């Protein structure tokens, strides 16, 4: 199956994305400017028949640009989530967290009918293949802190500050 990719230079690093031959977004990753990890060649090895195409990916590019320029708070992109039934259930629930707001891992576990499965929600969050569009950055710990690996925390905090759900002052007071 052919796949098409493009990238967008955001204030926080390059956003790479891949769509399938039907135009559905299947993968999106914000590669942090401070510690870039994705290179075009490694992305090409991840997907069969990958072609770089600004034209095919233009709708994603436009909506990502609008998001980073504070002209878009929700996305209307076609996407295809690939994961376990539980992961897909969690990811679908994440899309219900409004721009500029957060929910805890525990709240998401309750919403998907798995009370007490906050850690499993965290793992599903970690494996989210379409970050930003499926807003895993909006899911936080019950203590109000952004959780995850150090690099992931940094990216997620930047996105929450961008959306107004977290301020630099709040962040500095929690450190």
Image: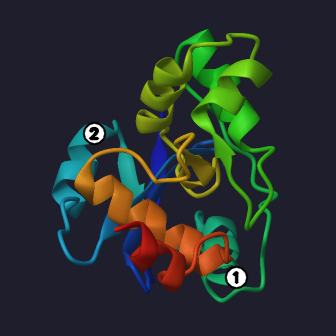
Residue name at image x 82 percent, y 58 percent = 76
Residue at x 68%, y 53% (from the top left corner):
102
Q: State the residue position of label 2.
A: 46
Question: In x, y percent, where is residue 45?
Answer: 21, 42
- Left or right of 132? Residue 115 is right
Q: How many marks?
A: 2
Question: Disc 1 designates what residue?
Answer: 66
- Residues 152 and 41: in front is 152
Dot 1 lies on which element?
A: helix
> Is 89 drawn above or below residue 162 in the view shown?
above
Q: Earlier in the sequence, mark 1 or mark 2?
A: 2
Disc 2 secondary structure class:
helix
- Residue at image point 67% right, 77% down: 164
Could you give the CA–CA distance between mark 1 and mark 2, rounded to whole angstroms?
Answer: 27 Å
Give how far across and how far down residue 136 sits, in percent: 56, 47
Q: Is residue 6 visible from the viewing direction of this image?
A: no
Query: What is the crowding at mark 2: few (fewer than 14 residues within 10 Å), some, or many (at least 20)?
Result: few
């Amino acid at each position: 199956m052919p796949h098409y990719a493009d990238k967008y230079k955001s204030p926080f690093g390059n956003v790479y994305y891949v769509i399938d031959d039907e135009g559905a977004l299947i993968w999106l990753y914000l590669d942090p400017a401070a510690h870039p990890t994705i290179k075009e060649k490694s992305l090409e090895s991840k997907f069969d028949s990958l072609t770089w195409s600004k034209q095919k990916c233009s709708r994603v590019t436009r909506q990502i640009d609008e998001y980073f320029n504070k002209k878009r708070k929700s996305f209307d992109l076609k996407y295809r989530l690939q994961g376990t039934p539980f992961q897909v259930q969690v990811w679908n629930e994440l899309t219900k967290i409004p721009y500029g707001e957060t929910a805890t891992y525990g709240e998401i576990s309750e919403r998907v009918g798995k009370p007490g499965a906050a850690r499993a929600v965290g793992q599903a969050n970690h494996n989210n293949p379409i970050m930003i569009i499926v807003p895993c950055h909006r899911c936080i710990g019950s203590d109000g802190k952004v959780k995850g690996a150090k690099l992931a925390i940094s990216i997620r905090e930047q996105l929450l500050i961008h959306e107004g759900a977290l301020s630099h002052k709040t962040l500095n007071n929690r450190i």
